[in-house]
């Protein structure tokens, strides 16, 4: 057996092929491996940030590489590295002092579950801290799905029936995405007039209670009763926010449910934790600040004469409406940007037939032609692997 540290080649990182073909990046991953897994040997040297002469000198040397940066896989970020200390080859695995393993153990200790205000007599608590995230009763949480065979829960919320002796298990109310169960299939066809079904990925319904292991938690979200929301479009513009108005009776025993099984959920029975309401308010204030900043920047472009007509593409219908409300003079296309690009290419080649419709089955205005657009202002990139709730599933603490 041998203990190894792992490197990433440039093409495996966020910078891709921009990296030197001989440059490696040191990660925080390590492992004990069998010697039969070793395929060969290469030479990897540490070089400082400014040592570029060495870089150009090894381009043609086979099996010769260098490193000078650390690479964090989760955050896709780089930090300046220091040279690894090579310990005595005769050191046993038990006594081998691996900085990556020490750091991993330290993170594991910091991410251990800590119960808040535990009442041992009743076996209840007001909340807990897991992986540096604080959860409270009546909080809303996201849930990690194990595999496709498992029941795909969307949102859950916990009540006071908790078992903390000795392992913590959460009793949660499960919310599921409405469109996954009750909406008709959606049709998309560029170039032909078809009927589109409006989807709302933020709508959920209360399905059933279940127990949940804290290891399945993946952060917090927020679910709000529709009658508690003043501006639904603005609410859905916030990150990880969902709304509910229906529930399935808990005494209903069926393998599958239909829309006829839904019953209105009384808003008086829907409660929120103080902490979650504070977080939602902070998120609203943050979004108002960001939108105001964007609006001022856009106004500055217009007033200075830099920007004339503003075009915008937004796939999410609620976000498109909010964008149009904030910028009434803008031309907003509520559609898939990739398909709009294909449509524009075909339009220039006179290959399109019919009218293009948006996500709400409204005819789209003619798109600008080649040469009409002189400036493109883009937002932040979406990280790989982020697919909102469709992949993660979710849950919520009550």
Image (spheres, grey):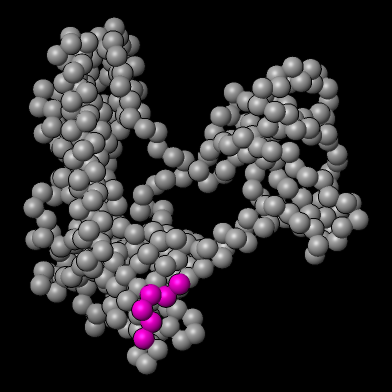
Q: Is residue 25 left or right of residue 4?
A: left
In the picture, the quarter occupied by the N terminus is bottom right
Magenta segment, which residues? 114-119
Q: Is residue 38 magenta?
A: no
Q: Residue at x 36, y 49 (%)?
A: 388
Q: Is residue 31 above or below residue 302?
A: below
Question: Residue 118 lies in magenta, yes or no?
Answer: yes
Q: Foreground residue, 12 or 351?
A: 12
Q: Position of residue 204 (x, y in %)?
A: 24, 60
Residue 104, relative to residue 120: is it above or below? above
Residue at 37 percent across and 53 percent down: it is 390
Please tell me in which quadrant of the rendered image residue 119 appears: bottom left
- Which corner quadrant of the image does residue 7 belong to? top right
Tell me the quadrant of the picture where the C terminus can be found. bottom left
Image-based side of 372 in relation to 90, left or right: left
The vertical placement of 51 against 36, above or below, is above
Asked whether the viewer can see residue 106, the reply is yes
Say how many tags the image has: 0
Residue located at (75% from left, 33% from top): 46
Is 96 situated left or right of 346 in this image?
right
Residue 186 position within the rendered picture, expressed as x and y whole percent measured from the top left: 27, 45
Q: Nearer the viewer, residue 336 or 311?
A: 311
Picture residue at 15% right of the left edge, 37% below the top:
321
Displayed quadrant of residue 369:
top left
Front-most of 207 and 47? 47
**Outermost residue toward the right in this view:** 90
Q: Measured from the top left, where is residue 182 in percent x and y?
A: 23, 59
Residue closest to the far top: 371
């Amino acid at each position: 057996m041998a203990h190894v540290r792992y490197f990433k080649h440039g093409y495996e990182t966020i910078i891709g092929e921009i990296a030197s073909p001989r440059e490696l990046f040191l990660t925080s991953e390590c492992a004990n491996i069998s010697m039969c897994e070793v395929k060969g040997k290469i030479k990897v040297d540490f070089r400082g940030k400014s040592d570029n002469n060495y870089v150009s000198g090894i381009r043609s040397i086979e099996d010769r590489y260098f490193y000078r940066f650390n690479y964090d896989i989760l955050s896709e970020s780089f930090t300046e590295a220091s040279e690894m200390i090579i310990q005595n080859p005769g050191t046993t695995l038990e006594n081998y002092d691996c900085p990556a393993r020490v750091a991993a153990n330290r993170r594991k200790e910091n991410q251990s579950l800590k119960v808040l205000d535990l009442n041992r007599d009743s076996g209840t608590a007001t909340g807990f801290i897991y992986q540096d995230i604080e959860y409270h009763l009546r909080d809303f949480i996201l849930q990690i799905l194990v595999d496709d065979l498992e029941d795909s829960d969307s949102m859950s919320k916990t009540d006071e029936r908790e078992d903390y002796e000795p392992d913590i298990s959460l009793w949660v109310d499960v919310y599921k995405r409405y469109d996954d169960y009750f909406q008709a299939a959606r049709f998309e066809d560029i170039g032909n007039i078809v009927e589109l079904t409006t989807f709302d990925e933020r709508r959920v319904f209360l399905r059933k209670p279940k127990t949940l292991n804290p290891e399945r938690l993946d952060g917090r979200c927020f679910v709000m009763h529709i009658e508690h929301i003043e501006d639904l479009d603005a609410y859905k513009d916030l990150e990880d926010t969902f709304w509910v108005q229906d529930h399935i009776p808990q005494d209903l025993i069926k393998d599958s449910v239909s829309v006829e099984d839904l019953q209105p959920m009384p808003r008086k029975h829907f409660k929120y934790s103080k902490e979650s309401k504070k977080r939602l308010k902070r998120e609203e204030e943050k979004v108002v600040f960001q939108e105001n900043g964007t609006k001022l920047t856009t106004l500055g472009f217009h007033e200075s004469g830099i920007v004339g007509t503003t075009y915008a593409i937004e796939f999410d219908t609620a976000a498109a409406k909010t964008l149009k409300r904030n910028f009434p003079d803008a031309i907003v296309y509520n559609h898939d940007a990739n398909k709009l690009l294909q449509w524009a290419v075909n339009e220039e080649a006179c290959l399109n037939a019919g009218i293009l419709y948006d996500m709400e089955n409204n005819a789209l205005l003619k798109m600008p032609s080649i040469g009409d657009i002189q400036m493109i202002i883009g937002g932040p990139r979406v990280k790989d692997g982020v697919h909102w709730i469709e992949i993660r599933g979710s849950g919520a603490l009550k």
